[in-house]
Image: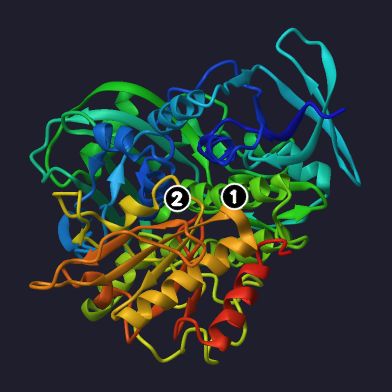
Amino acid sequence: MVDTDVLIVGAGPVGLTAAAELRRQGADCRVIDRLPARLPYAKAVGVQPRTLEIWDRMGMVRAALEVAVPMRGQVVYADGAEQARFELRLPPEVPYVFAALPQYETERIIEEHLARFGTGIERGTELVGFTQHEHGVVSRIATASGAQQELHSRFLVGCDGAHSTVRKGLGLAFEGGAFAQEYMLADVEVDWSLPQGYGVRALHHARNGRVDDILVCIPLPGHRRYRMSMLVPLELSTSGEGASQDSVAHGLEGGRAPRIEHIQAVLDRLSPQPTTASAMRWSSVFRISHRLVDRYSAGRVFVAGDAAHIHPPTGAQGMNTGIQDAYNLAWKLALTLEGGAHPRLLDSYDAERRPVGEEVVRRTVRHATEGIRAAPKDMTTVMLREAQLLVAYRNSPLVAADGAKPGNSNAGSPGPHPGERAPDCHGLTAGVAATPLRLYDLLRDRGHVLVLYADSADALTGSRETAATAHRLTGDHVTAFVITPHQDTAEPIQGQTDADGRHLPVFQDGAAQFERLYGIEGPTAFLIRPDGYLSARLSPLSAPATTSALFDALGRVFHLP
């Protein structure tokens, strides 16, 4: 007997994302968390543009946009003088900017979205242990009443943080180390006149040139409200108490909480302007480690987020990386549970996400010790990387190795290639829609999507045949539509049917942005995954090589007839 398809341990942003996407894809799940209620702490506050794109695809971005505040940049001060000012600017086609949102608000938004599917959080419930067998996982859980029970699931996902019970139960290595410094966090308001929407990083150097004092302020929703972090004074040091149980010194620690006077003392030393802190909502002492598991799964059990990787919070990479872990895994689990997946699809989770975790740990450790250093000509790349828009899966087993052969992408062509993020574009028009649409409007709340570019009558015929082939191979798992060049004088092409008579919507590239951003060089098919990455780029349409390449691309994900 199976109690649920997937048991998710941990109701932070990562676990909630996994649950919400599983439920959106039609899979059953249960979410347990040992805490009796959501914590009121603004721990992770940076929300990257890529995360907002994911929330857009899930149909929940609007709630975040209503409460988040834009991050415009960061001003760096050293020894009382301004040293640098970074503008968080992205190309205009990127639909979202960097944002700040307290973690408890992020959790509320995803939890409310999850509730629309009839799924809530089982609070005060803790995973005690688990065993797995060929067909599922048996978990031992302790409920809020103290009673223990067994819960049977087909899969188990550990989103239970740096001290993960799931990770320990799998016996995964978690190699790395800890930073010697302890820090304190506080959520306060200040009365300075520094530009709003900018983070503040203020340093002090000792005579030997080493940094001996630091203040980092991230804007939060509210009037001149910030989450501040700084070195902890000796009287508040926890002396590594948080590492006593499992030697992982990471996150909020025990000991005395900082008072407003502790925060004011640091501001008196480092603030670029004289200012007074007030309205402190919470404070804590915390430690930072950098560790990475040796694998993200074993059998039917997976880890994601801080259970798999921990690192300095530089650039707000931690929570955002974890959310992408969860989203990557969830659509693959849902397809597997439905019975439509390739038998090795779930193996791609570790293959795709562990290299990302390695890069994030390495980069954040470097930035924490050296700072973000780049020549001005490199700043666009730096910003795209910090926005997590350059994350790619080019070496994934889901991406064909023969990408340069006919019927797939040419490595030298412009536009996205298989394994890369599918960019948004605007200006798409249709007969009924009076207002131009974004590509992401057409991808929202869907699974795999086949986008077909047709610039002639013959190409449109090829599109109809390609769409029909995808449907024959996968059933309703792939949605298709056509994009055509803008036509000023000719009668626009209306909706079509594919070669098997199913409706095939047609949109015009009114702003020619799709053609530019996707590097169109002729009729092409783009297979876009549920997480917004390109699975295949196929051209020309209806050629035998293209049909073979489409079969190969779909066969890496789906169980084909």
Residue in front for this viewpoint, 349 or 439: 439
Q: Residue at x 40, y 76 (%)?
A: 461
Q: Residue at x 91, y 47 (%)?
A: 134
Give the image location of residue 384, x and y in percent: 33, 66
**Image label count:** 2
Describe the element under mark 2 as helix, strand or loop. loop
How would you rate the neighbour count of disc 1 (Cα within 10 Å): few for under 14, some for 14-19, many for 20 or more? many
Judge whether 193 appears above or below 282 on screen.
below
Q: Residue at x 38, y 55 (%)?
A: 50
Farthest residue toward the top? 145
Q: Which residue is mark 2?
A: 313
**343 with respect to 392 (left or right):** right
Is residue 287 shown to the viewer in this render? yes
**454 with respect to 499 (left or right):** left
Give the image location of residue 399, x and y in percent: 59, 74
Instruction: Please state which amino acid type lies under the numbered disc 2.
Output: Pro
Which labelled disc corresponds to residue 331?
1
Judge whether 99 appears above or below 124 on screen.
below
Instruction: Please state which amino acid type lies under the numbered disc 1.
Output: Trp
Farthest residue toward the front? 501
Quadrant that contains the N terminus: top right
Q: Quadrant of residue 33?
A: top right
Give the image location of residue 170, x and y in percent: 82, 47
**449 with respect to 240 (left or right):** left
| Pair 2/1: label in front | 1
Q: Quadrant of residue 439?
A: bottom left
Quadrant that contains the C terminus: bottom right
Give the image location of residue 49, x and y in percent: 33, 53
The answer to which of marks 2 and 1 sits earlier in the sequence is 2
Q: Are marks 2 and 1 in contact (CB under 8 Å)?
A: no
Residue in front for this viewpoint, 190 or 211: 190
